[in-house]
Image: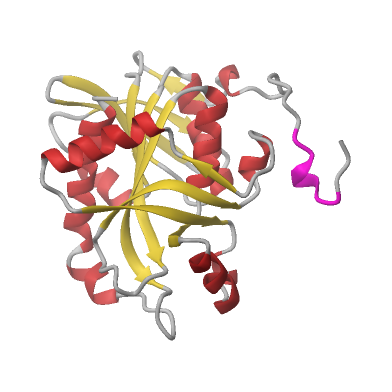
Amino acid sequence: MEQICPLHEYDNTREAYIEPSMGRNIYLEETIPSSAVFTFSGKLIEQLSKLESVKKIGYIETQIEKSDIFKSEYAGKPFAFSQMPVGAAAAAIKLERLIALGVNKIIVFGSAGVLNHEISAGNILIPVSAVRDEGTSYHYLPPSREIEMNQEVVNSIVEILEKHHIHYKKCKTWTTDAIFRETEKKVAKRKSEGCLTVDMECSALLAISEFRKIKYGQLLYAQDSLGSIKWDPRDNWVMMESHLAIEKMFFLAAEIATNL
């Protein structure tokens, strides 16, 4: 089992010392729906929580924060939603806990950097595969360079987007733990592998979904660009248009999740 890199010492034992099903620091007032939407936007969660159609049904508490869980409906179908923390390891903990509560059809959406400057801010991308340049996924699946999204889930996402005549692009994404180590050489390498985007969670969450045998999909919207001579944060779009784009994606995600 011993390898030069500990991340390659995969152990397929199903049971761990600490299981998410233990339910510690999780508080629910009613059964959680099997469909769920997660967004990285705290502002959007705050805004949605004030709607009459939304009900708070519980929360997950940690040493540093309390994360609320809400319930709503899309076309008469119930779904849960909550904020997803940034970063593979933190997002994995949240996903594991919600799966243990009974959630098994999940859509996560958030921003991604683009490696092709021609992809405009706000464009919707479906990450159908991800380069595993993070550490979490290697604890759930054997070592491999990439991981793919379940094709059935990809088809469901495409069906909803095309139903609403929304332009999208399928892509390979580069999932990394180290936002401050996105160097020129690494970007060039990922581009040569066919990556169009860079994110911090996708490959880890795909690995967990495969390990736990649940339906999981992700939507990305293009934000900053690493595809030019220097980093372009695209601040004008973020300040003026990103809020509307995020809100629009939430309801798309809700429709997809409730139809998986």
Query: In the image, what residue occupies the spot 35% across and 57% down?
Result: 111
Q: What is the quadrant of residue 177 in the picture?
A: bottom right
On the picture, is 204 further left or further right than 77? right
In the depicted structure, whether residue 174 falls above or below residue 256 = below
Q: Is residue 167 above or below residue 64?
A: below
Residue 236 percent across, percent down from the top left:
23, 76
Asked if residue 64 shows in the view, the reply is no
- Position above or below: 252 against 233: above
Q: Residue at x 48, y 41 (%)?
A: 148
The quadrant of the rendering that contains the N terminus is top right
Return the residue nearer the eye: 56 or 112.
Answer: 112
Up the image or down, 248 lies above or below 177; here it is: above
The magenta segment is: 4-10
Q: Residue furthest top?
A: 31
Residue at 37% over, 78% down: 232
Which residue occupies the foreground of this view, 99 or 222?
A: 222
Residue 246: within the magenta?
Answer: no
Is residue 79 visible in the rendered structure shown here?
yes
| Residue at the bottom extreme, as displayed | 229
Residue 226 appears in which quarter of the rendering?
A: bottom left
Could you say which quadrant of the image residue 215 lies in? top left
